[in-house]
Amino acid sequence: MEKSSSAKDTHCRKGRMVKEAGSGPAEVTNQLLVTTITDEAVIDRGRMAGEALDRRDMWEPGAHYALGQESFCFAGHRISVRESLDTHGALVWPGAVALCKFLENNQQQVNLKDKTVLEIGAGTGLLSIVASLLGAWVTATDLPDILSNLTFNLTRNTKGRCRHTPRATALTWGQHLERDFPCLTSQYDYVLAAEVVYHHNSLNDLLSTMRHFCRPGSRTTLLWANKVRFPSDLRFTESFNGSFHTTLLCEMPREEVRIYKATARE
């Protein structure tokens, strides 16, 4: 499915999160419901890109689509992000939209005003933009070849709108963490991660990166949004639960996205 090159405006509205049933957040177990994948080999990069193009049928944000860009309404602002099909990091994925909705609709539970926030795997920067609009000091990170588009989107959507100017910097999971982000000076209130777990070979490096920024005894809270696609996602979740005290904040059954809150185990 191709995106229309003639954009049509639609009414922007707040999405509503589907909260976990009960009076409070439920503890995460290692049992996750996931759609059975009969042949993992056929779910390749091309199909994932196709899923990104079809996600208008899976989401419920007010959105305006045009070739190479998407627009959303969050925190009282229209946000337009430029994306590309050249790499996974240049696409907006369902988990990022879900976490944006959660942060906007639950500001008493997660108050980002004047908080320090690090996003890992920022991609197009949508989540970092929303965190900035909600008043946070944001550092958005991704691979070096993603930074140009990431910086463009951050500047385009936050200049003159935010209390604090966000910045983009390179981060390769598991590499030079102490050199580039020393523990003594790189301390954050929140670490955000959306759709960073998928079928790639850097899951161990991702987990070590999460551990680096969310250390035992630190004030850091990790918020992770994920849509399960592969058996490797479930294996990562088991390892994640072994490293962090984890709570399921909410889930969106239709989109198969879950949002977790985590702090480091001692």
Image: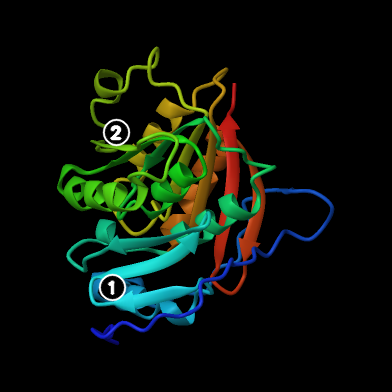
Query: Looking at the image, can residue 234 be seen?
Result: no
Question: As rendered, which of 200 and 183 lies closer to the eye?
Answer: 183
Query: For the point 26% across and 86% down, which residue is it?
Result: 6
Q: Residue at x 37, y 58 (%)?
A: 198
Q: Amino acid at mark 2?
A: Gly
Q: Residue furthest right?
A: 23
Is label 1 in a helix, a strand or a loop?
Answer: helix
- Relative placement, left or right, of 66 versus 260 is left
In the picture, the disc for residue 174 is 2
Q: Nearer the observer, disc 2 or disc 1?
A: 1
38 left or right, relative to 85: right
Residue 123, percent across and down? 30, 52
- Left or right of 237, for residue 119: left
Tell me where residue 79 appears, x and y as whole percent.
39, 60
Query: In the image, residue 126 lies at what x, y percent?
Result: 38, 55
Q: Quadrant of the C terminus?
A: top right
The residue lying at 34 percent from left, 63 percent from top is: 80
CA separation in Å, label 2 and label 1: 26 Å
Q: Residue furthest front?
A: 160
Residue 49's tag is: 1
Q: Quadrant of the N terminus?
A: bottom left
Colour scheme of the rendered structure: rainbow
- Mark 2 secondary-structure assignment: loop
Checking the image for residue 20, the label placed there is none
The quarter of the picture where residue 251 lies is bottom right
Q: Which amino acid type is marked by label 1?
A: Ala
Q: Is residue 183 visible?
A: yes
Give residue 167's position: percent from left, percent from top.
Answer: 30, 36
Horizontal side of residue 97 vs 46, given as left or right: right
Q: Residues within 10 Å of mark 2 (few under 14, many from 20)?
A: some
* Residue at x 27% of width, y 86% of height: 4
